[in-house]
Amino acid sequence: MKPCQNCQTVIDEYILDKQLEPLRELTADDFSVCADCVTIVADACVECGGAVYVPRSESVTPDYCPACRSDLISRTGDDPGWTRCQASN
C-alpha cells in the first residue's frame, strides 16, 4: 500500500477502485491519490462524454478523461493536457 501524494494517508485501493468505476479501465494502481483527495465528475470528458477525475487541490475540472488523453497522445503525439486551451473552447 502506498501513501497518497497529496495527504500522505495510505491509499485504500478498494474504496478508490469503486470511486473510479466510471473511468474506463482504470484502477487504483493508476493513481497516486486516495479517494478523499480526488473527486469524480461524471459526463465531463469532451471526447467520450465519460467521467474525469479532479484532484481536490485543483479548481478546474479537466476536459479529458485519462483514457481519452492517452488516446490523443497516441494518435497525435501531442499531449493536450487535462484542459483545452481557451482559444479552442
Image (cartoon, rainbow, N blue to C red):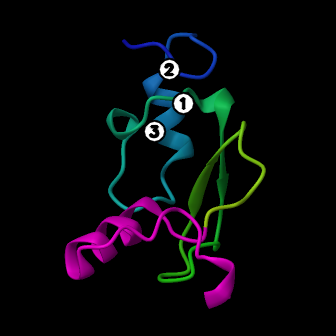
Is 21 on the left-hand or right-hand side of 24? right
Mark 3 touches mark 1? (CB < 8 Å): yes
Q: Quadrant of the C terminus?
A: bottom right
Residue 54 rendering spot, x and y as whole percentages: 64, 49
Residues 8 and 40: in front is 8
Q: Which residue is mark 1?
A: 15
Q: Is residue 10 above or below residue 70?
A: above
Residue furthest toward the bottom?
88
Q: Amino acid at mark 1?
A: Ile
Residue bearing the label numbered 2: 12
Tell me where the magenta segment starts and ends, as one range. 63-89
Q: Quadrant of the N terminus?
A: top left
Label 3 – label 2 distance at C-alpha:
9 Å
Question: Circle 3 sits in a helix, a strand or a loop, which is it?
Answer: helix
Residue 82 position, x and y percent, is 53, 62
- Of labels 3 and 2, earlier in sequence is 2
Q: At x 58% / y 10%, what residue is drawn?
A: 9
Is residue 85 shown in magenta?
yes
Instruction: Report crowding for label 3: few under 14, some 14 to 19, many 20 or more residues within 10 A (C-alpha).
Output: some
